[in-house]
Amino acid sequence: MSWRGVVERLTWGGLGLASAEDGRRILLRAPLALFPGEEVEAELRWKPRHAEGTVTRWIREDARRTKAACPVAQACGGCDLWEAGAHEGELKSLMVADLLGRQLPNQAYTFHPAPPSARRHRIQLHWDGAALGYHRRGSHALVAVTKCPAAADPLSQAIPRLTDALEARILPGKSQRWELVTGTPAGEVRAVNENGQAWLLNPDGWHKDANPVTHRFGDLRISQDAGAFFQVSPEWAHEAFSTVLDGWNLRGETLYDLFGGVGFFSALLGDRFHKRMLVEGFEPAVERALANMLALDLPTECVASDVTAWCPENLGTPADLILLDPPRAGLDEALALKLLTAQAGHLILIGCDGAPFCRDLQRLAPAWEIQELHALDLFPRTAHAEFIALLRPRNH
Ligand SMILES: C[S@@+](CC[C@H](N)C(=O)[O-])C[C@H]1O[C@@H](n2cnc3c(N)ncnc32)[C@H](O)[C@@H]1O
């Protein structure tokens, strides 16, 4: 059914909230940003108590709305906020306020908008045998792309080179999922297929390559294997996390870097802790973390294990810090239960999906209270944000 009305506010995930005449709630999706106060037309599907709909036409646009700087912005599922332009931070802060206001009422926090320079250093593309591109919004169909303005320039420029090599069968066309990745600062580009095989792009084409991708942040140098996890916008992630961690200035005996990857947070915290223990489930990342930390002269005990299986009861002493950076789904319940007995002086919880992050803070709440909370826009042009909380024992 067609409906016409005003977007009252923005919710977590970028959905607009409006009200029907009878007061029932309407959740509105718009492909490339919604501003509160805009008047729109939408097609609604009614559920028992509310409606969900997609905006089909703008009747009154917000003056801040901009033209998308990407030719496939409407169809491509990779970005949600192109038409917010320079005002994306304002919209993202409203989304974060909606989530935190509902999940952690009265909790103070700081929001850090992304700088306009933040670009993705890792993009995942799909090859269907004829074209290379991203998934269409809300489906697995392909949107062919020849560039990606959300990505660092060298990655964007490498897209047609990858298409050419796949069309010419120079690279194995059987692989359907391809990642393009570059280091920091952005430069060399590698293409990695779904089997983890990597090729380096040279002026004369793609060359099989097993060397790591290297990120340099001032004096700090961290390597990752192409295809392994690393921060998507590394320069901005480094700046944002450094600002928060420097502000907290935590020091002590042992850092437990859990879900440690290749050692990003152990490296950021440097020699503030006398000893470091990193636990990570992906073995190649553990080997890389060991090498990264040795090269930084910060010897670290690196353990390849599932964090929940590894984590003992009563972990740490009051001089220690436990830092947890789990994948999107957050902490599993068994791990959260073990952490209720932990003896560390502080715990840092990081999350790249706000809903599981808030759930985990609530699970930890019987033993751990929030000392400080930050929301970082590490995923510009999407409706996602990163969260980091400093927790202290409730009985401190
Ligand atoms: C969000 S990433 C964080 C990595 C690292 N802290 C960083 O910032 O680069 C989550 C990491 O947890 C690892 N991981 C996922 N599930 C795990 C588990 N159950 N036990 C141990 N590590 C796990 C992944 O391999 C990945 O490296």
Image: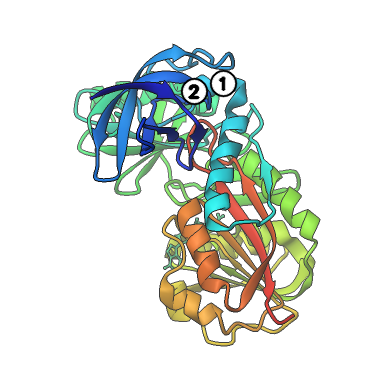
Say if disc 1 is inside 8 Å of ligand 1: no
What whole-number distance in Å separates the C-alpha atoms at marks 2 and 1?
A: 6 Å
Relative depth, front residue between 242 and 244? 244
Image height of 342 relative to 33, above or below: below
Q: Residue 256: where, in percent of width, then height?
A: 62, 73
Image height of 207 relative to 168, above or below: below
Please name the amino acid that badge 2 sits on: Trp
The quarter in which the N terminus is drawn is top left
Relative depth, front residue between 115 and 102? 102
170 vs 341, left or right, is left
Q: Are marks 2 and 1 in contact (CB under 8 Å)?
A: yes
Q: Which mark is residue 344?
A: none
The quarter in which the C terminus is drawn is bottom right
Q: Residue 343: where, in percent of width, then height?
A: 65, 84
Q: Residue 86: where, in percent of width, then height?
A: 62, 22
Residue with the mark numbered 2: 82
Residue that lies at the very extreme toward the front in this rendered image = 22
